Amino acid sequence: MTTKAILVTGGAGFIGSHYVRTLLGPHGAKGVTITVLDKLTYAGSLTNLTEVSDSDRFTFVWGDICDASLVDELIAGHDQVVHFAAESHVDRSILGAADFVRTNVTGTQTLLDAALRHGIETFVHISTDEVYGSIDVGSWPETSSVSPNSPYSAAKASSDLIALSYHRTHGLDVRVTRCSNNYGPHQFPEKVIPLFVTSLLDGRKVPLYGDGANVRDWLHVDDHVHGIELVRAGGRAGEVYNIGGGTELSNKELTQLLLDACGADWDSVRHIADRKGHDRRYSVDCTKIRRELGYRPTREFEAALAETVAWYRGNRTWWEPLKHRLQTAA
Ligand code: NAD
């Protein structure tokens, strides 16, 4: 078997590190080596990669995907790219969009240019269901146009279009995945599930936006990683694949489950003004990845959520310093 050298950008973040730990773990991919390129922004942490740091199939490079000479030098030794690196938090994009455009758009274009120059065989671009915008009923298929509403999703949609243009213009084998909301261990405690769980475990109140009726499809990060691997191994060049099919919940319903899991009640909830431009509902149609690649989510929501809450309960040393940093930066 020939070994594939994969460059994973953003591999010190939540989903990227789960991807790396999975591929290099006991039931992972055979015949791959991984280089992680990560800038270690506030959202990235080397502790997410401790499990694999001794593997002879793993290398870490600290750097920025916008650094064209570093990216060019690094990509030369690789067969494939799986591109997670991004600014990923919607609320931060509302406060200031510059880093989102720089990393998500210019960073992606920098990687694509280098991938083209060095004949990368497959470039998997990780994107989000948020690029389609809000949908009241039904689900977006991949043929829908993008209609993003936040600076985060607009920057992601731009990067999707640029990535796909490198396939159509230059023939680069680009594959785009668009996934729904993920949950699981190692998610930065500003995102709703870890924010609520870690706050409730500390006896603090949690903020619920608006009327709490906004709906999201929640998918365990294991199922996302599984979908990405199916696309990397068997997807088609120039295609977009939606990944989802988790559990649709309103924020109010999710809050109730998290209150129950942490032994708290609605007295622990602070109602706050709605997020600006808050999309009402996201939903992706996953027929294509199911039919073409045999994808199906395997993690049952309530059990996987309980396991996730237990992980945060048992790993205070992971999230306490991160929350401390957030609080002192505020
Ligand atoms: P994250 O914020 O946890 O991690 C992002 C990682 O990228 C961090 O390690 C950070 O240090 C790194 N990074 C940021 N800017 C960089 C730069 N300029 N150069 C190099 N590295 C940089 O994000 P996540 O939740 O793991 O999301 C990963 C990808 O998946 C993103 O592209 C996101 O849009 C997409 N996605 C996320 C979700 C979700 O629910 N979290 C859902 C669908 C898609």
Image (cartoon, rainbow, N blue to C red):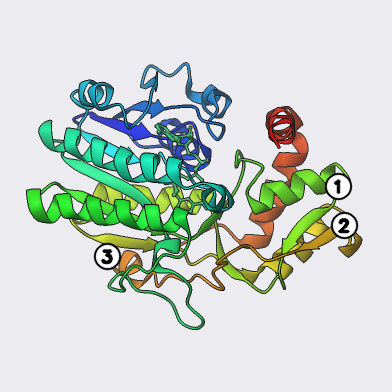
Quarter of the figure with residue 106: top left
In this figure, which residue is indicated by the disc labeled 1? 204
Q: Is residue 294 visible?
A: no
Say whether marks 2 and 1 touch (CB < 8 Å): yes
Which of pointers 2 and 1 lies earlier in the amino acid sequence?
A: 1
3 or 2: mark nearer the eye: 2
In this figure, which residue is indicated by the disc labeled 3? 292
Return the residue nearer the eye: 309 or 255.
Answer: 255
Specify whether 106 is left or right of 2: right
Quarter of the figure with residue 65: top left
Return the residue nearer the eye: 295 or 168.
Answer: 168
Q: Which mark is residue 149?
A: none
**Label 3, label 2: how far apart the Cα atoms are:** 45 Å
Q: Measured from the top left, where is residue 91 in percent x and y?
A: 58, 52
Q: Measured from the top left, where is residue 185 in percent x and y?
A: 62, 42
What amino acid type should be assigned to the residue bearing mark 3? Glu
